[in-house]
Image: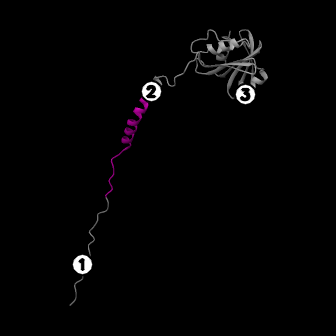
């Protein structure tokens, strides 16, 4: 007798995996981004309304008084600067019989300038205060006196007066009008 063929083993048919397509669209992605960006925009807005970085205004009078008390050179101080000028640093230093007064200001337009007065020899003072690449721009008249104008340290401007046993430098990132306004206020 012949044997009946054995039934083929069943492997249990496995259905191919069904790919589930999520119904996420570009619109859903945009909504998700908006939900994330709204709190970020609020935080930035609050920071800006608060004024951003707080500027610490200093009283320059003690440094100016100290420079005058040292009696090393005739010290000038700004008188009657318009609104918007804010002193942010002030110091007077003495070394080897030479005094240097430095007062830093923020200008009304948001620029930054520094007033430097010293009895130091101008030839040794200029490279340190103005850098190595001084490009003369001519003269400007301040209160009837000629001051030298230059572009220094890349793109900064400077006006300089070397007379009366002292050198006065007004230098920084501001317009020439703001530099000469500060120079004109010196008394």
Residue extent of the magenta highlight: 18-46
Q: Is residue 33 visible?
A: yes
User: Within 10 angstroms of label 2, few (less than 14), some, or many (20 or more) residues?
Assistant: few
Residue 116 in the image, given as x and y percentages of width and height: 69, 19
68 within the magenta span: no
Residue 148 in the image, given as x and y percentages of width and height: 75, 18
The disc at residue 45 is 2
Q: Which residue is mark 1?
A: 7
Q: Which SS class for mark 1?
A: loop
Residue at the image position 45 percent from the left and 29 percent from the top: 44
Query: For residue 43, what is the image quadrant?
Result: top left
Q: Is residue 181 visible?
A: no
**Which of pointers 1 and 2 lies earlier in the amino acid sequence?**
1
Q: Nearer the viewer, residue 60 or 11?
A: 60
Query: For residue 55, what is the image quadrant?
Result: top right
Q: Which residue is mark 3?
A: 131
Q: Which SS class for mark 3?
A: loop
Is there a contact, CB below 8 Å, between mark 1 and mark 2?
no
Pick out the residue farthest to the bottom: 1
Nearer to us of marks 1 and 3 is 3
The disc at residue 28 is none
Is there a contact, CB below 8 Å, between mark 1 and mark 3?
no
**Which of pointers 3 and 2 lies earlier in the amino acid sequence?**
2
């Amino acid at each position: 007798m012949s044997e009946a063929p054995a039934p083929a083993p069943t492997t249990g048919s496995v259905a191919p995996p069904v790919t589930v397509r999520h119904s996420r669209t570009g619109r859903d992605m945009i909504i998700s981004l908006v939900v994330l960006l709204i709190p970020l925009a609020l935080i930035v807005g609050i920071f800006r309304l608060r004024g951003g970085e707080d500027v610490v205004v200093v009283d320059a009078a003690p440094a100016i008084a100290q420079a005058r008390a040292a009696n090393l050179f005739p010290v000038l101080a700004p008188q009657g600067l318009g609104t918007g000028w804010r002193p942010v640093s002030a110091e007077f230093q003495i070394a080897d019989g030479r005094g240097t007064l430095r007062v830093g200001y923020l200008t009304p337009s948001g620029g930054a300038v520094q007033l430097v007065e010293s009895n130091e020899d101008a030839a040794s003072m200029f490279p340190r205060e103005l850098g190595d690449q001084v490009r003369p721009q001519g003269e400007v008249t301040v209160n009837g006196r000629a001051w030298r104008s230059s572009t220094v340290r890349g793109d900064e401007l400077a006006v300089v007066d070397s007379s009366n046993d002292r050198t006065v430098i007004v230098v920084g990132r501001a317009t020439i009008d703001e530099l000469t306004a500060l120079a004109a206020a010196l008394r």
